[in-house]
């Protein structure tokens, strides 16, 4: 039993807030999605900081999103939504993942770019823009991934 399972075991097992099997699955997927999101954030930030002096801040923000999104897709496919949609063509599913998460992309990078170019402090500390962008896109990305990509 993993750490995530032990967290869920502390939730009510009876009553109106009972942890039904469907709710348990949903919560486990969301928690795993969050863990993958943290890894994606680290990949995202690393790519931005590594590339911003090479291709500019805006270019690095865009490139980093696709690098991190691709890594997130692979880990979500193998862990978060393990076995769900596994028979689908990998490249097709990756394309659907990117398309489905385009709203999250707009929320994420729109927030990050807006903050970067309007708040001088954040322009000097891009990681803060990345955190804000990640939070802005997280819920739409989870919902769309669950309903459209890994079903």
Image: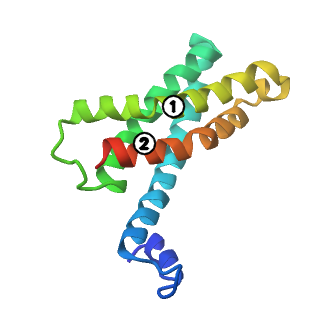
Residue 18 on image: x %, y % = 48, 81
For the N terminus, the quadrant is: bottom left
Quarter assignment of residue 113: top right
Quarter assignment of residue 72: top left
- Residue shown at the point (84%, 28%) measured from the top left: 121
Proximity of marks 1 and 2: CB atoms separated by less than 8 Å: yes
Which residue is outermost to the bottom? 14
**How far is the residue under mark 1 from the one under mark 2?**
9 Å
Residue 56 on image: x %, y % = 62, 12
Residue 133 on image: x %, y % = 64, 35
Residue 38 on image: x %, y % = 54, 48
Picture colour scheme: rainbow
Q: Is residue 101 left or right of residue 93?
A: right
Q: What residue is disc 2 on?
A: 144
Q: Circle 1 sits in a helix, a strand or a loop, which is it? A: helix
Q: First in sequence: mark 1 or mark 2?
A: 1
Q: Is residue 75 visible?
A: no
Work out whether 19 lies above or below 131: below
Q: What residue is disc 1 on?
A: 103
């Amino acid at each position: 039993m993993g750490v995530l399972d032990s967290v869920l075991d502390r939730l009510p097992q009876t009553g109106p807030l009972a942890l039904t099997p469907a709710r348990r699955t949903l919560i486990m997927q969301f928690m795993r999605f969050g863990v993958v999101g943290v890894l994606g954030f680290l990949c995202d930030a690393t790519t931005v900081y590594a590339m911003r002096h090479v291709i500019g801040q805006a270019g690095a923000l865009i490139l980093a999103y696709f690098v991190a999104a691709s890594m997130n897709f692979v880990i979500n496919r193998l862990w978060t939504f393990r076995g769900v949609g596994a028979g689908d063509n990998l490249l097709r599913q990756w394309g659907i993942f990117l398309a489905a998460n385009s709203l999250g992309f707009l929320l994420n990078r729109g927030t990050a770019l807006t903050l970067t170019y309007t708040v001088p402090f954040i322009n000097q500390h891009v990681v803060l823009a990345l955190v804000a962008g990640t939070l802005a896109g997280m819920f739409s990305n989870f919902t769309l991934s669950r309903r459209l990509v890994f079903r």
